[in-house]
Image: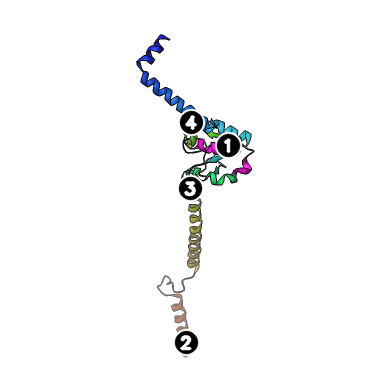
Amino acid sequence: MEQILEFIGNNVILVGVWIALALALIIYLSKSGAQAIGPQQAVMLINRNDGVVLDIRDKKDYDTGHIVDSVHIPHTKLSAQLAELEKLKSRPIIVVCKMGQHSGDACKMLLSAGFEQVVRLRGGMAEWRGQNLPLVQKAVKEKAAKTKTGKAKAKPGKNKAAEQAPAQLDQPDKAAPDETGQTELGQKEVGQEEVRQDDNK
């Protein structure tokens, strides 16, 4: 005990800073009015209690990776689009932002609108990614679909060229010379001349 008091006496400024930070955190959490849960708790809430993820990040961040079946309403448009969430009032709502800095305000807004089961994801999507949990990447999916479509369009051209090649090879070469160097046509003409000469004799 004496050592603790001695440490506090020697580091008054440092201890004061830590106390101030702790009070600020308590005030911030009390203002948000919603419980903070970790990614694993969020997964359990989704699977066992039919929880809904509300992603309030902007569209660019949302498209780079979001939780499966999440509802996307940007933080700046949430107040104007609260009516879209009315059908979800009976289900737990997990508010997700980029790093946890905006989810508190969004939770407060939802609670004021009559939503009772509102929680926020601690650490936001940064924490979710940090635990290597699954994400849906819209941009990657669209790019893969376009690449697949492009390959499918290129295949008919190759098949058409392959079909034409055998047809050209099957055509007989009427003017091909034999071993004596004469063509088939030339041999027929010579044969007719011999018949005519025999008749004249």
Q: Nearer the viewer, residue 130 or 173?
A: 130
Q: Closer to the camera: disc 1 or disc 3?
A: 1
Q: Earlier in the sequence, mark 4 or mark 3?
A: 4
Q: Residue 126 appears at what percent x and percent y?
A: 46, 36
Cα distance between the residues tagged 1 and 2:
115 Å
User: In the rendered image of this protein, does residue 60 appear above or below residue 24?
Assistant: below
Q: Where residue 146 sits in the image (x, y, percent)?
A: 49, 53
In screen coordinates, is 42 left or right of 58?
A: right
Disc 1 element? helix
Q: Amino acid type of disc 1?
A: Leu
Q: Which amino acid does the dot numbered 4 rest on?
A: Tyr
Task: Say if mark 1 contacts mark 2, CB within 8 Å.
Answer: no
Residue type at mark 2 is Arg
Q: Residue at x 49, y 27 (%)?
A: 26
Q: Which mark is residue 28?
A: 4
- The amino acid pointed to by label 3 is Ala
Asked if the residue under mark 2 is in contact with the one under mark 3, i.e. CB atoms within 8 Å, the reply is no
Front of the two marks 3 and 2 = 3
Q: Earlier in the sequence, mark 1 or mark 2?
A: 1
Q: Quadrant of the N terminus?
A: top left
Residue occupying the far bottom of the picture: 200
Magenta range is 85-112
Q: From mark 1 to mark 3, how far is it between C-alphas?
A: 33 Å
Q: Is residue 146 above or below residue 188?
A: above
Name the residue beneath numbered marker 3: 139
Give coordinates of residue 42: x percent, y percent: 56, 33
